[in-house]
């Protein structure tokens, strides 16, 4: 279990490796926008500020640009923690 903290939300959730960060957020009542849940639409894009993630399912090739990847952008619906995380979620 890893601690996942969202910069703009005052809540810490525990996520197991192999578990989708986004689905755990939903279970815990954290309001993170999403749509496809398959790494395609980028609605759930966020920035990893601290820590390491990997993907349960590889996101669609066109979903994140090289620039996004370089800037630690991830898709929360298909991402899982590899360490404790601090995440900057997208604010509307
Ligand atoms: S919800 Fe569509 S990419 Fe995550």
Image: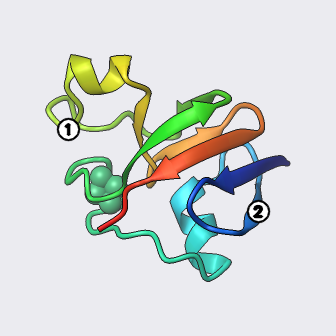
Q: Position of residue 67 (x, y in %)?
A: 24, 19
First in sequence: mark 2 vs mark 1: 2
Q: Residue furthest left?
A: 62
Q: Which residue is mark 1?
A: 63
Residue drawn at (68%, 78%) of the image: 28
Cα gap from disc 2 to disc 1, whole angstroms: 27 Å
Tell me the SS state at disc 2.
Answer: strand
Tell me the SS state at disc 1.
Answer: loop
| Quarter, ligand 1 | bottom left
Image quadrant of residue 60? top left
Q: Is residue 87 above or below residue 68?
A: below
| Mark in the foreground, 2 or 1 | 2
Tell me if 62 is positioned left or right of 17 in this view: left
Q: Is residue 70 above or below residue 34?
A: above
Q: Residue furthest right?
A: 1
Image quadrant of residue 64? top left
Indicate if the residue with disc 1 has its beta carbon within 8 Å of ligand 1: yes
Q: Position of residue 12 (x, y in %)?
A: 76, 62
Neighbours of disc 2 within 10 Å: few (<14), some (14-19), many (20+): some
Q: 65 or 20: nearer the eye?
A: 65
Q: Is residue 6 above or below residue 49?
A: below
Residue drawn at (63%, 66%) of the image: 24
Q: Position of residue 73 (x, y in %)?
A: 39, 34
Q: Which residue is mark 2?
A: 12
């Amino acid at each position: 279990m890893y601690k996942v903290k969202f910069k703009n939300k005052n809540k810490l959730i525990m996520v197991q490796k192999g578990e989708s960060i986004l689905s755990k957020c939903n279970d815990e009542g954290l309001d993170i926008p999403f749509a496809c849940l398959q790494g395609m639409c980028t609605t759930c894009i966020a920035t990893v500020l601290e820590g390491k993630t990997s993907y349960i399912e590889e996101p669609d090739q066109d979903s994140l640009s090289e620039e996004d990847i370089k800037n630690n952008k991830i898709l929360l619906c298909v991402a899982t923690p590899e360490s404790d995380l601090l995440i900057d979620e997208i604010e509307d």
